[in-house]
Image (cartoon, rainbow, N blue to C red):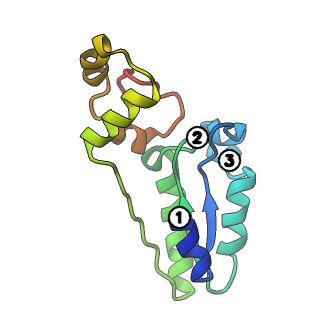
Amino acid sequence: WLRTGARRNSWVFADLYSYPECDPVLLLPSIRDWRTSKKWVVAQRELVKPQPRLVVHQHNCSPGMGAILLKQLLEWEPQLHAKGCKLFLITTLRSPASWAESMIFYRRIPHARVHAFIAASSDYQLKYLLHGSCGLEMGQSQ
């Protein structure tokens, strides 16, 4: 619905979500390499306009918001402010129970392993938000 809403209101939609085949550049930990992603070039083109209108969707196979993306966005905030624009950061997370149910189904976790899976995935959405797909596997604590 973000893509549809952006298009309907003449906003550019930069989709950093690229499942099932991740853009290999998005998986690299260096922000310099990340900036060369074809998907991010869409965002950069919009940001140089006098009054950019941009929605960025960060999901699977993208740098973590806390580890990489937030620093980049905050560097642009003064430039956007100088153009009379505002930077809005909006985060939507699933309820933990809904997320766990979805992951159990998606990863085909056998009933006998559900308890261990849930225990190993504590705070997974928080870790994912901070670190993204870069090196964070299910059950690995960071």
Going from the N terminus, do you reach mark 3 or mark 1 first?
Answer: 3
For label 3, the residue is 32
Above-or-below relation of 115 to 54: above
Three-letter amino acid code at the position of disc 1: Glu
Q: Which residue in the protein does label 1 denote?
A: 75
User: Residue 91 location in percent, x, y?
Assistant: 38, 58
Q: In the image as oriented, which residue stretches furthest toward the top?
A: 112
Residue 48: name its quadrant: bottom right
Residue 127: name its quadrant. top left
Check disc 2 and report the residue beneath it. Answer: 61
Residue 29, x across and y down, in percent = 60, 37
- The foreground one among 90 and 74 is 90
Residue at (36, 57) in percent of width and height: 92
Crowd around label 3: few <14 · some 14–19 · many ≥20 (10 Å): few
Label 2 vs label 1, nearer the camera: 2
Q: Secondary structure at mark 2?
A: loop
* Left or right, residue 68 beside residue 120: right
The Cα atoms of the two marked residues, 2 and 1, are separated by 22 Å
Residue, x 37% and y 21% (percent of image)? Answer: 139
Which disc, if any, is residue 134? none
Labels 3 and 1 touching (C-beta < 8 A): no
Q: Name the amino acid, label 3.
A: Arg
Q: Secondary structure at mark 3?
A: helix
